[in-house]
Image: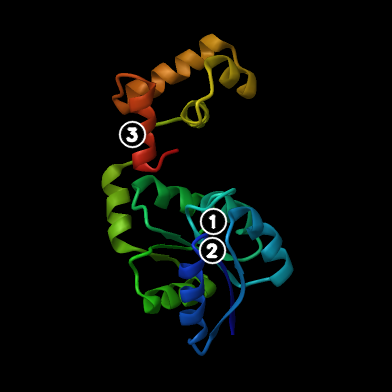
Amino acid sequence: MIRVLLAEDEHLVREALAALLNLEDDIEVVAQVGSGDLVVAAVAEHRPDVAVLDIEMPGLDGLSAAERVSGQCRVVILTSLGRPGYLRRAMEAGAGGFLGKASSSDELAAAIRKVDAGGRHLDAELAAEAMAAGDNPLTDRERDVLRLAADGASLGRIAAELHLAEGTVRNYLSSAMTKLGGQNRLEAILTAQRMGWL
């Protein structure tokens, strides 16, 4: 029996997924959580074989949660957002599966089985989009600066939080804008978010 944890913030969707998966002879949903912040504790408590994580959840997002639990169980990421950068980030976070929410319950069950067995299961359309989009051109520092700027942080706050000089923050913002073809930081942020690079 494959023990599964479901992390999905929409209650109806989570309940429906659990009901469908529990109809499978070899899959049992042992825990359900509605927030990314609850994933780590639920994995420790219920010891699932596979965690199925929604990419967009309140608190900790699915990619961050995957990073924290991938050493304790296998991970399948579900997303309604087909952003190319998300697939690469999911793989880097240790996920073995990556599916769009438009997938059938049969495909989700097949992904859980494959990932539980140590394989990978990737949504073909999302994988093709990720390959066509190419690599994320941003450095880790540029991503950090853009992420804080996206949250509305001032130049001074970004500098303080990242322990950098304000001039260095300006340089990172300018470099990110150039790489992303943005006329200003807002355009750069929107492009990075649309591509799933933030």
Residue 136, can we see it?
no
**Residue 94 numbered tag:** 1
Residue type at numbered disc 3: Thr
Q: Nearer the viewer, mark 2 or mark 3?
A: 3
Sequence order check, earlier mark of 3 and 1:
1
Binning the other alpha carbons within 10 Å of mark 3 as few (below 14), some (14 to 19) or many (20 upward) gives: some
- Which one is nearer the viewer's eye here, 172 or 22? 22
Residue 19, can we see it?
yes
Binning the other alpha carbons within 10 Å of mark 2 as few (below 14), some (14 to 19) or many (20 upward) gives: many
Q: Is residue 140 left or right of residue 80?
A: right
Alpha carbons under labels 2 and 3: distance apart? 27 Å
Point 66% across, 63% down: residue: 72
Alpha carbons under labels 1 and 2: distance apart? 7 Å
Q: Are marks 1 and 2 in contact (CB under 8 Å)?
A: yes
Residue at mark 3:
191
Residue at mark 2:
75
Residue type at numbered disc 2: Val
Looking at the picture, the colour scheme in use is: rainbow
**Dot 2: element:** strand
